[in-house]
Amino acid sequence: METVWWVFKQLYEKGLVYRGVKVMPFSTACNTPLSNFEAHQNYKDVQDPSVIVTFPLLEDETVSFLAWTTTPWTLPSNLALCVSPDFIYVKVKGALHLSLTIVLGMHRNESSFAKTDKLCFCLYRFPGKTLKGKKYKPLFEYFIKCKESGAFSVVVDNYVRDDDGTGVVHQAPYFGADDYRVCMDYKIIQRDSAPICPVDSSGVFTAEVTHFAGQYVKDADKNIIKWLKENGRLVSSSSFKHSYPFCWRSDTPLIYKAVPSWFVRVEHMVEKLLDNNSKCYWYSESGVSTPVCDLRVCDDLECWFFVGLEELTGAKVSDLHRESIDGLTIPSRCGKGQLKRVSEVFDCWFESGSMPYAQVHYPFENRREFEDAFPADFIAEGIDQTRGWFYTLLVLSTALFGKPPFKNVIVNGLVLASDGQKMSKRKKNYPDPSLIVQNYGADALRLYLINSPVVRAENLRFKEEGVRDVLKDVLLPWYNAYRFLVQNIQRLQKEEAIEFLYNESTASVSDNIMDKWIQSFTQSLIQFFRDEMGAYRLYTVVPKLVKFVDMLTNWYVRTNRRRLKGESGTEDCMRALETLFSVLFSMCRLMAPFTPFITELMYQNLCHLIDPASVEEKDTASIHYLMLPHVRESLIDKRIESAVSQMQSVIELGRVIRDRKTLPVKVREHLPAFTTTRSTHKYIHEGDSELNVRQLTLSTDKDKYGIRLRAEPDHMVLGKRLKGAFKSVTASIKELKSDELEIFQRTGSIVVDGHELHEDDLRLMYSFDQTSGTPSQYEAHSDAQVLVLLDVTPDQTMQDEGVAREVINRIQKLRKKGHLVPSDEITVYYSSQPAGEYLDKVIQAHTDFILATTKAPLKPYPVAQNASVIVQEKTQLKGSDLELTIVRGSSVSRALLTTAACAYVNLRVTLKDRQQGTGRTLTVTSGSSPADASSSDSLLCPYVNLQLMNASPAECKTGDVATLLLMNPAGKNALLFPDLLCEAAKVFGLRGRKLTLCLNEELTDELEASSLHTLNTKTLFVKVLPTTAEA
């Protein structure tokens, strides 16, 4: 606050502060002015009175000006009439049954009155500027003294419109912004003159307006119209429907009214303001420019002399807020008694404009820090702040220091409701932000807004489905790639006992093309990110990051799933995992400013997989403490990036053909692809499995397949340049032969009808001639670089394989439905009815193929009776009923147990010594070894093996096989039947659950209490009975 005072004091001492009025939207219900933004929040269509009033010329009262208004209550404050200098006005005699001659705009000339008055005729036509200075008779004489300053005369200004009214606008300068400006220009009113504003803060006429004093202005309209009619000044009265602003708080009509304020004088700084503004770079595509107008000030103005309250008042001041200093007074230096704080307060924009200095309490402290950091590198705000914060920052900085307050401005557009209207709390025309965050997450909302037209200073129509799409298309695929990485690192550690720790400096360089591509693509992205963010071009960065997520998930991860799962060997798996880890870690650091929560979540897991020796940052507790990754230029290979881009084109073109022919995605076809870049041939094979073609043929032999080049003109470019010749040149372009266009491809130029054309003028495309002798089973599609021919001839083996892939797809979706991960051991049971039909035969023929993909045994129904069912589903496929059941555990049968299932040790205690071993008898003695020490390796106590069949262990227990001693020690403490059930429940962590012990694996032969003496060395099968909820 002290700095804000200091700013005002500097302006006052420079002679830049004056007191005046400003016409503003005013709420008579709330007794307060509103900002223009607030005034625009609540417009309504209303019916207002519409009157046309006469203003007789003083030089000839038989001639009158006609003025139209929809606010009759402003007529008592009329001080001038305004016309356009360039409009044509007419002098009409006898119009509207009047015995006088009238002057009005040409758009309302004598033809306008022909239907109502056959006797009217035009006397003269003349431009509005000839009326300047004409004097007229006032409607009311409340403010006749203003005649001395030029009031009650005609002025000219270009703001007058001809789309409605008479072309003559009545001026009440303290009730209209344009009225005020025009009357100021003509010195009818002065900055320091008493305002002609006979309306109080409640919207009631004051005593000056004697005829209507005490009346609310809107209520007074009818009485004013009545007065005009009685005094012969009313030409017509009707109603007019238009859009009018209402107070968003009280829902009452607003009026425009002069409000006394303090101002900063800026007229003398216009050139300097424009010069400083030109030194600021505006990062938007809207061409924002800074307006020049008066700056209204407010917020604890406190006293006239800003020299030090304590010195002037003699009081100790520790709090600068109003309630602490309102009682302080200062003796007048002019002997006029005690000075008190004025009632006005600083406008929030004055405080905001003082931000660069006030935030560091300049100049009272931190002077060096402020001067080193001023002007700021950049500021960011909405486009609606060009007349607010941007402007006040610029004015105050120019007035105080003579330089701009910032170097760069990042401008964002406005977020509107889905229908294009402004978001309104009153209308509730937007979704609840808390529900948006709850349903989709803060990161999805942030990324939706940052990747929208808003960052280009354009408006955004906010749609909830846009946030949902960001979650579905960007964040979830990205998270799934991260989860896939972690799962496979855990698999590597579990199955291969290999610890994964990433070290960028020691990581092996992969020879795999796709590894090289994604590494190069990542480093190119980092380079682009640094360049564009350094230039404040946020709107170019986020689309690239979003595209990168697609490249990572839909291209790299999908084409390398088998490598990442270790199917191509441990070494190749390590290269792929290191590559994916490196890319995801870099991606997290780049995305952290935009999606701070998901990147922090990923980082907190990924950081444990980084070799501590490779960490350079001192504080690594959060991803937001890390610096941006540096560009590793050695990994950038634009040749590979281009090659993979062409590979992607081939795949995408093939997909278009599939969609066009409605071919099943899982069918593999023969695909010849033509490209003009021979170096890409070996890379396109990387797309073989992605496109699911059986054979990929690469060729540049266009004649063999009837391939031709054709050209299309760029209509926009050539149309402007060729003008009249464009039509004939276009026809000639379409007649160009393939040989000519191949030469054009190499040289980059061609002459057509005497006009030299270049690469930007033509678009080349490949065409496939079906009549050239090429077999008709080919379908073609192309872009500027590649033509793809897809052999769509039906083939039964491919159709069968496609159906088998669809079965795989159903199994994997069912796996996901059961919340299973790839490492979970399962068995899949299936039933295809009717048995022996097409689907059943396909599944039987492709059982090994399905197993190789799902990594789970596939068995026909029935499901084993003791199986622990996880999830089931019935569906239709190829006219058959397909039922799938996933059960827990592999279906591989266990070998029959012939000894104790668990490790054991026998103890024969006689005292003292101890040895250790499994399946051995240990003798404990106080002296020498006993003579009768047994050397038997068998378990001395009777025992039973337990195998858990239809449930999983609980209470942190693991394993589904156990051994229980029936006696311990031998011949003592024999287990009874209830004890056996209790111990079985304990060993598997199933206390509280009801169990049944069975003698067979099918769980049909239940153990009886009388059979305990026969159990030694046998295996019992444990069946867990369902709970009431499960039943």
Image (tube, rainbow, N blue to C red):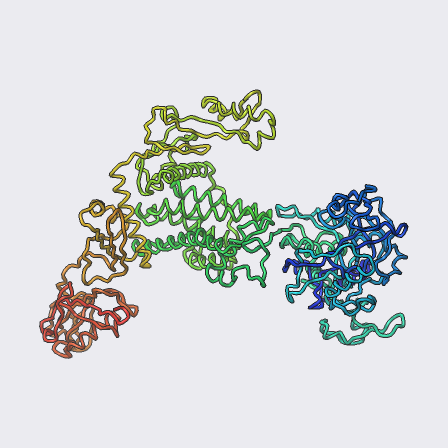
Residue at figure coordinates x 84%, y 61% from the top left: 140
Residue 368 in sight from this viewpoint: no
923 and 251: which one is in front?
A: 251
Image side of residue 645 versus residue 27, left or right: left
Q: Residue furthest bottom?
A: 973
Image side of residue 596 versus residue 154, left or right: left
In the rendered image, the vertical position of residue 346 relative to residue 686, given as above or below:
below
Q: Quadrant of the C terminus?
A: bottom left
In the rendered image, the vertical position of residue 4 relative to residue 653, given as above or below:
below
Tell me how many marks there are: 0
Horizontal and vertical percent for residue 652? 41, 39
896 and 787: which one is in front?
A: 787
700 and 367: which one is in front?
A: 700
Horizontal and vertical percent for residue 203? 74, 66
In the rendered image, the vertical position of residue 516 relative to residue 496, given as above or below:
above
Residue at figure coordinates x 83%, y 58% from the top left: 139
Residue at figure coordinates x 12%, y 67% from the top left: 1005
Horizontal and vertical percent for residue 537? 58, 47
Horizontal and vertical percent for residue 890? 23, 57
Image side of residue 226 versus residue 447, left or right: right
Image side of residue 191 versus residue 396, left or right: right
310 and 69: which one is in front?
A: 69
